[in-house]
Amino acid sequence: MLRLNLKRVFALRGMENPYRELVNLGMSRPTAWNLLSNKVDSIKSDRLEQICTLLSCTPNDLYEWTPSAKAKNVETHPLKALDRSGNTNRYNELIKSVPLDKLAEAEAMLAKLQSGE
């Protein structure tokens, strides 16, 4: 099943109140709630662009794929790149566990990844 998972990206970006962020983008309260509760079958492209701009991501980052029991060639399927079975919280816990004297080194590595080097 292919679905939006906005909560995951908001969490990765350290945004603790995604509902408020969506409302601040101009979305109605019911729309924001439905998007965060995965109760939508579609999303308007202008809304998708707003969310991607806010989160500095691509639409692919917002989607996740869980293969159905009937799915074939799961390991080689192009949607495999959207398999998000990992736990988002592990990234936050990982950064919290980095020794303080190593944070500058971690920041430098992240900056290097960000610049594409």
Image (tube, rainbow, N blue to C red):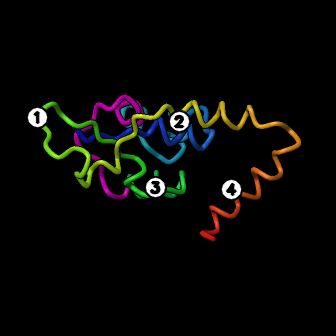
Disc number at residue 110? 4
- Please give the range of residues in magenta: 32-47
Mark toward the start of the polypeptide (3 vs 4): 3
User: As rendered, which of 21 and 80 lies closer to the eye?
Assistant: 80
Mark toward the start of the polypeptide (3 vs 2): 2
- Give the residue type at disc 1: Lys
Mark toward the start of the polypeptide (2 vs 4): 2
Is 39 covered by the magenta stretch? yes
Does dot 2 land on a helix, a strand or a loop? helix
Q: Is residue 3 found left or right of 23 in the rendered image?
A: left
Q: Quadrant of residue 5?
A: top left
Is 115 covered by the magenta stretch? no
Query: What's the residue at 27%, 50% (across, down)?
Result: 79
Disc number at residue 18? 2
- Give the residue type at disc 2: Pro
Mark toward the start of the polypeptide (3 vs 1): 3
**Disc 2 and disc 4 in contact, CB within 8 angstroms:** no
In the image, which is nearer the foreground, mark 3 or mark 4? Answer: 4
Q: Position of residue 81 (x, y in %)?
A: 35, 51
Does dot 3 land on a helix, a strand or a loop? helix
Q: Which residue is mark 1?
A: 70
Disc number at residue 83? none
